[in-house]
Image: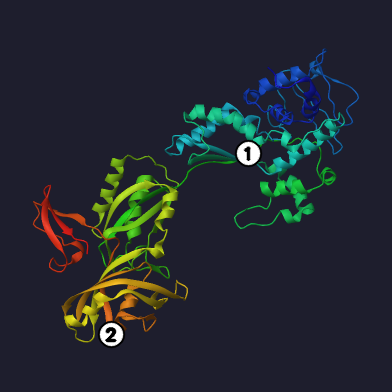
């Protein structure tokens, strides 16, 4: 059933006569169900013409200041140019050939003066197939998609002009037409294209999908349609750093809502002129939202930064924790780039032991996104086999929200460290025993000199929760600390020229320095397979001697394991 009623005839005749396509006529008549829009364009035009025909097969054109006589359909010939551009007072006429198609100089149909061809050839099956071919050739892995379109901002100006025309004519009949009564162009376009895309690609359209197919349209011929708005409403068009033009859709809509109707009609023709060409497609792009991989890493090297160490454009070390992990992920996920984050960081010469530091990597625009748990395990093993400087555990895909939890409460966390301390004066075991009794020591730390170039100058209060000392020789001892997260351990030991007070040197009344530092991310019992029974080598966990911490060896499922007992 044709969607227009007798009461819509006047508006439909008016719009068709001024060069508006059938689908836009449906929009202005408030047709809000999908089926009519989905019909092929030529069928729609034929049906609309039949609806508007008089008993004598004549189409009466009712426009402001109409021509003095009727146009007989049977008298029209194929070579007629089509819609004559209307002058500002609306005078003009339309030519409709017998075959039902609308002819123009550059194509086999007249270009709609409102949608500029968007609801004509760009929602037909032929164009949708081209879009889908582009998607299939992109190499992305997806099970659903979101389809987005970007229309030229001048479409809003043209729709506004057509609305004012229809509103004026309906007012003569004591009828009204609000802006919200018009079906939005994007809505109508999606009603038509979504089923076609879904059928062609065999996947559903889902607004929450991370895979997006976007089509950007432009219409150079009418690009100046918006320019008069900037003169009348200059405050609506402010330059933005990330925008190439001030004439964005939002800016144009803001100006249209602000401008007076009479001022608009003085500056822009109502109805809008018919263009010579349809819109052009600037780009068809495919993109996948970021996916996130998280896990924990241990760092066993004292010559490895967490992130690339580059000073004044010169690379200082050949690799980093970030790169040793992300290089593998980029290759497997086929991502364009990545962003690395972690719960805290360690210095280049500090090892990270324990159960590892939590990290997350955001993979930007990945082409592959679906992995089994076994494939993730194999990826983790591949990372671990590639270097003896780091090891990764608990690798898994996570949500964006989970990444936020990683850094929550960092200042309230407790961190554990093991340090090898040197003193200038000779010491005995009794000289360090008092450290074991110190609990919840408050210290004030000015921003260390070594990080002052990248951190603001401030005094931060931190807490040393506990310390445990183990004598080595008259100039060395091990110190195990539990501290508030964010404590600068090196500065607590040597004092940083008095910028940390109190410090270990002042407590012992000696000059102290730190030779080695390890961070234990969490207290726990860890079992690490260090060699097989066929191997003659045993790798000591963290490089510590067996007699210095509570470690024992035992056999487990064919592996020689070294177990560190939590202190």
* Dot 1 alpha-carbon crowd within 10 angstroms: few under 14, some 14 to 19, many 20 or more: some
Nearest the viewer among 196 and 431 is: 431
What residue is pinned by disc 1?
280
Q: Position of residue 335 (x, y in %)?
A: 41, 47
Q: Is residue 525 left or right of residue 273?
A: left
Residue 522 sits in quarter: bottom left
- Residue at the right extreme of this rendering: 68
Q: Earlier in the sequence, mark 1 or mark 2?
A: 1
Q: CA distance from mark 1 to mark 2?
A: 75 Å
| Element under disc 1 | strand
Q: Does 303 sit above or below residue 63?
A: below
Q: Position of residue 232 (x, y in %)?
A: 79, 52
User: Residue at the spot x=64%, y=31% of the render?
Assistant: 188
Quadrant housing the C terminus: bottom left
Residue 511, disc: 2
Give the vertical position of 130 relative to 385 (above or below). Answer: above
């Amino acid at each position: 059933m044709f969607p227009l009623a007798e009461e819509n005839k006047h508006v439909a005749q008016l719009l068709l006569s001024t060069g508006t396509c059938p689908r836009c006529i449906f929009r202005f008549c408030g047709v809000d169900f999908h089926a009519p829009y989905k019909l092929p364009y030529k069928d729609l035009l034929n049906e609309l013409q039949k609806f508007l025909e008089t008993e004598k097969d004549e189409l009466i054109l009712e426009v402001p200041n109409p021509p003095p006589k009727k146009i007989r359909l049977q008298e029209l010939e194929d070579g007629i140019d089509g819609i004559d551009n209307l002058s500002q007072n609306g005078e003009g006429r339309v030519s409709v050939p017998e075959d039902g198609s609308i002819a123009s100089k550059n194509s086999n149909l007249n270009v709609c003066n409102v949608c500029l061809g968007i609801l004509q050839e760009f929602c037909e099956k032929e164009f949708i197939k081209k879009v889908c071919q582009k998607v299939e050739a992109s190499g992305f892995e997806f099970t659903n998609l979101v389809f987005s379109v970007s229309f030229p901002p001048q479409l809003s100006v043209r729709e506004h002009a057509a609305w004012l025309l229809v509103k004026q004519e309906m007012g003569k009949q004591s009828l009204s037409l609000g802006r919200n009564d018009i079906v939005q162009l994007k809505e109508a376009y999606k009603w038509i294209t979504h089923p076609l895309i879904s059928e062609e690609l065999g996947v559903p359209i889902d607004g929450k999908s991370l895979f997006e197919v976007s089509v950007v349209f432009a219409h150079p011929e009418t690009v100046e349609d918006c320019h008069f708005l900037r003169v009348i409403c200059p405050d609506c068009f402010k330059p933005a750093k990330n925008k190439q033009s001030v004439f964005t859709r939002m800016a144009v809509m803001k100006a249209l809502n602000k401008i007076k109707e009479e001022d608009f009609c003085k500056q822009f023709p109502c109805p809008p002129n018919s263009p010579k060409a349809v819109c052009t497609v600037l780009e068809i792009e495919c993109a996948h939202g970021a996916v996130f991989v998280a896990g924990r890493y241990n760092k066993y090297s004292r010559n490895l930064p967490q992130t690339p160490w580059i000073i004044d454009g010169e690379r200082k070390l050949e690799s980093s924790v970030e790169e040793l992990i992300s290089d593998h992920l980029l290759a497997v996920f086929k991502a364009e780039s990545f962003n690395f984050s972690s719960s805290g960081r360690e210095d280049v010469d500090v090892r990270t032991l324990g159960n590892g530091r939590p990290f997350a990597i955001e993979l930007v625009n990945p082409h592959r996104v679906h992995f089994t748990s076994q494939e993730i395990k194999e990826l983790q093993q591949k990372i671990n086999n590639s270097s003896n400087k780091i090891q990764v555990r608990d690798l898994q895909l996570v949500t964006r929200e989970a990444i936020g939890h990683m850094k929550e409460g960092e200042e309230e966390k407790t961190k554990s460290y093991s340090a090898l301390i040197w003193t200038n004066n000779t010491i005995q075991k009794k000289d360090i025993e008092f450290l074991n009794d110190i609990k919840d020591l408050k210290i004030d730390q000015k921003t260390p000199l070594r990080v002052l170039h990248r951190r603001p100058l401030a005094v931060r209060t931190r807490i040393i929760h506990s310390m445990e000392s183990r004598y080595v020789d008259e100039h060395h001892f091990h110190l195990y600390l539990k501290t508030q997260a964010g404590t600068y351990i090196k500065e607590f030991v040597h004092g940083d020229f008095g910028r940390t007070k109190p410090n270990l040197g002042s407590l012992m009344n000696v000059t102290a320095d730190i030779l080695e530092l390890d961070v234990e991310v969490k207290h726990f019992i860890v079992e690490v397979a260090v060699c097989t029974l066929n191997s003659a080598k045993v790798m000591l966990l963290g490089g510590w001697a067996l007699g210095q911490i509570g470690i024992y060896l035992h056999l487990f499922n064919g592996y020689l394991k070294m177990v560190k007992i939590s202190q």
